Amino acid sequence: MLALHRAGHIVLPAPRAGVPNNIIRRRPPERVGVDTTATSDLQPLDFVAVRRSPLERSWWEHVRLLRSKRWYRGGVYAVDGTTITIPYGEVANYKGAEQVGEACGYKLVVILNIEEGHERVVAWVLGGLARSEKTLLRYLLKRLREQFGRLGDWMKVLVMDRGYWGARLLLDLKRREGVDFVIRAGNDELDVVKDMEGLATLPTTVWHEREEDHSRLGRMRVKMAGFMELPLFNDRGEELGTCQGVIAEEYDLKGQLLPDRPRFRYMTSLAVDPASADSVQGVRTYYRRRWSVENQGFWVLTKRWNLDTLVARNLDANRARLNFALQLYNAENCCAWKHPGTFEEELPRLKRPPRGERLGRPSIMVYTPDGKVGSFQVKEYRHLVTTAVEKAVQARARKDLKAVIEQALKAGRSIEDILRDL
């Protein structure tokens, strides 16, 4: 029969070839340092509590289940982070929390599949607030590689915000893992940014204009230009490799530059043809899809699942709750994708319609030793237990009756005498 089991184990039921365009290979005396740590040189992170716990195993079982059903689609993923801070005056005894200025708490980094309609979390990690998002990302990439093999076999593009800028990290992602990257340039002082700005002033640079719809700013006109083979250097002035770049400026429909909107500079390992408007705009489109992480990911997780609420001072307790909330987020998105209509419209399509109303009513969660979970109302659970007990009693009675008959026959009694006594 069903037995209560541990509550932390939930498994939800090619480019066109061309000559590089006017590359400026400057060697200024002082170069802006970039991160040069290779992903293969990573050491275990004690602050992430990375031991192979049942909680972590349950997450990877959950992801493997979704992958087996092909509920991750498209190969385009995005990484982003958010902070979970401790209320002022309550910072004492929070395990693993770190201080940055006056804020104290944790940093959560997630990798999501951002194919439209298939937004699913594939990996997450929780670290102290002072930890680098790049370090947390390297850890996630390492764990994904351990679980599912070479990243490039299933992840095609990884979209990142400027906080993950690092020449070695980006180039290793492409060379070693076969994953293309799209990222905003880290800051205006980077050499690759200065090179791209210099190329933008040349009369030979081709600019393209397209109109786009923005969720907050409405319809706008975007002016874009693409550049090939821009060199990336380390802090010693050594060239590590090249990438492509795109500059984008946003205007209103009257041609006026939008106020408080910076010039966007995107860097990518994808092939870019500066003469093709579709090729140039494609890079910007990839980056704009990253907003699904904030608009549909963290917003839903924060507003609906209270992701930014700490339930205890214990790190493992907070990680267990995050694990539970992120699995529920994936499950909800899977259900919304498979059953996009209203409850009344989708009810006939369900294989086994639920009995009774569960929302807002007490339910009993029952877990089996093999990791399955079921939700029952009190009446349903009482019927389940009563039926199981009745069957057990009947089975015991049959077993006892059989034993009595066999013993009497061995004693030489006739079947008539035995039945008369019974």
Image (cartoon, rainbow, N blue to C red):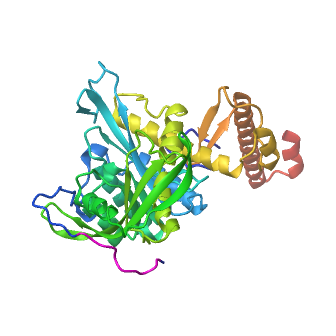
**What is the number of callouts on the image?**
0
Residue 412 location (% of width, % of height): 79, 54
Left or right: 35 in relation to 108: left
Q: Is residue 55 above or below residue 72?
A: above
Point out the residue furthest to the left here: 29
Helix, strand or loop for the magenta stretch, by majority: loop
Q: Residue at x 68, y 30 (%)?
A: 359
Choose between 166 and 389: the one closer to the eye: 166
Compare residues 338 and 231 and report the one nearer the observer.
Answer: 231
Q: Percent position (x, y) of residue 222?
A: 49, 53
| Position in image of residue 297 (x %, y %) | 51, 43
The image shows residue 233, relative to residue 261, as above or below, that is: below
Q: Which one is in front, 72 or 114?
A: 114
Quadrant position of the C terminus in the picture: top right
Magenta segment boundaries in residue numbering: 15-24
The image shows residue 52, relative to residue 355, as above or below, that is below
